[in-house]
Image (cartoon, rainbow, N blue to C red):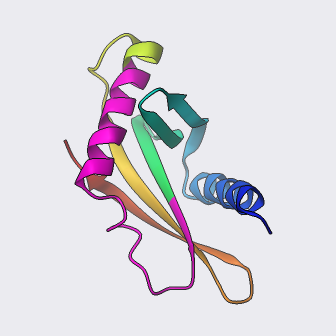
Amino acid sequence: MNTRDAGNKGESFACDFLRQQGFRILETNYRVKIGEIDIVARDGEMLVFVEVKMRDGQDWDPFEAVGPQKQRKLYRVAEQYLLERYKTLEVDGRFDVLAVHVMPDGTLEGDLLKNAFYK
């Protein structure tokens, strides 16, 4: 499986996983010049920006992969999303990280960290 196919499989899994958790997917792969947000969703009334990290094996910490520099970039992309879609920054929202683990048998497992970081 090439990188693009793996990414598509991971994104599809991530959306299904979030739906099973009660999320409503609003948008995937929101892109602007400075970056991208993998998934924008609603968890009840809360607007959620989800960063998806997919890796083989279990010897990695996906939550550490979203360090301060990546957090700042996601925050700036989220600001642009809010201004474009809602015309304000005054929207209740949060940032989650969804780890997608590729198991040895090829199946995928998800691990969601809500409120992964703050500004």
Q: Position of residue 10 (x, y in %)?
A: 66, 61
Q: Position of residue 116 (x, y in %)?
A: 30, 57
Task: Determine the residue positioned at 31% across, 25% down.
Answer: 91
Task: Determine the residue positioned at 32% across, 68% down.
Answer: 64
Drawn side of residue 85 relative to residue 29, left or right: left
How many labels, in total?
Answer: 0
Q: Quadrant of the C terminus?
A: top left
Q: Position of residue 100 (x, y in %)?
A: 56, 68
User: Picture quarter containing residue 79?
Assistant: top left
Q: Quadrant of the N terminus?
A: bottom right
Look at the picture and state if 57 lies above or below 89.
below
Is 71 magenta? The answer is yes
Look at the picture and state if 101 lies above or below 89.
below
Drawn side of residue 69 relative to residue 11, left or right: left
Is 116 magenta? The answer is no
Give the residue at the far left of this rendering. Answer: 119
In this view, the residue in front, 112 or 70, is 70
Task: Determine the residue positioned at 49% across, 38% down.
Answer: 36
Task: Determine the residue positioned at 67% across, 56% down.
Answer: 16
User: Picture quarter containing residue 12?
Assistant: bottom right
* Range of residues picked out in magenta: 53-82
Q: Position of residue 112 (x, y in %)?
A: 45, 64
Drawn side of residue 19 relative to residue 84, left or right: right
Look at the picture and state if 90 lies above or below 31.
above
